Amino acid sequence: MQEYINKLVLELRSKFEPKEYAEIKLLLFNKTHDDWVIFKNSKAELDASPYLGLKRYKEVKASSMLESTKSYIQYLELIKDSIK
């Protein structure tokens, strides 16, 4: 999944270049991507925190990260479709 996200991010970054206000849009996109990584990790820690010290901790954390990643991929694909 991470490879697919990286591919989408690179593709989207290249699409911003020839467009109007491209520099600002690219900066905002990069900031959003960086913030998403922080959000994904923080959400996973929060979701798993009730299970700290238990066997389910890793499972809940991974599940949360997967859920966030799937949502982010959908978001990136929507942006990609809107830029054409």
Image (cartoon, grey):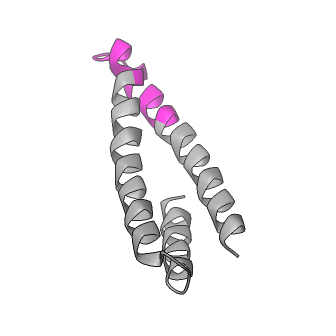
**From this viewpoint, which residue is outermost toward the front?**
20
**Where does the image place residue 69, in percent across and percent down from the top left?**
53, 47
Seen at 54% across and 79% down, the residue is 20
Seen at 42% across and 22% down, the residue is 47
Among the 4 quarters of the image, the one containing residue 12: bottom right
**From this viewpoint, which residue is outermost toward the left?**
53
Residue 4 higher or lower than 60, as above or below:
below
> How many marks can you see?
0
**Where does the image place residue 70, in percent across and percent down from the top left?**
60, 47
Seen at 54% across and 87% down, the residue is 18
Judge whether residue 60 is colored magenta.
Answer: yes
**Dominant SS in magenta:** helix
Judge whether residue 40 is colored magenta.
Answer: no
Magenta range is 47-64
Foreground pick, 77 / 84: 84
**Quadrant placement of the C terminus:** bottom right
**From this viewpoint, which residue is outermost toward the top?**
50
Foreground pick, 56 / 50: 50
**Where does the image place residue 37, in percent across and percent down from the top left?**
37, 49
**Quadrant placement of the N terminus:** bottom right
Among the 4 quarters of the image, the one containing residue 79: bottom right
> As drawn, is 81 to the left or to the right of 55?
right
Residue 27 higher or lower than 53, as above or below:
below
Seen at 36% across and 23% down, the residue is 46
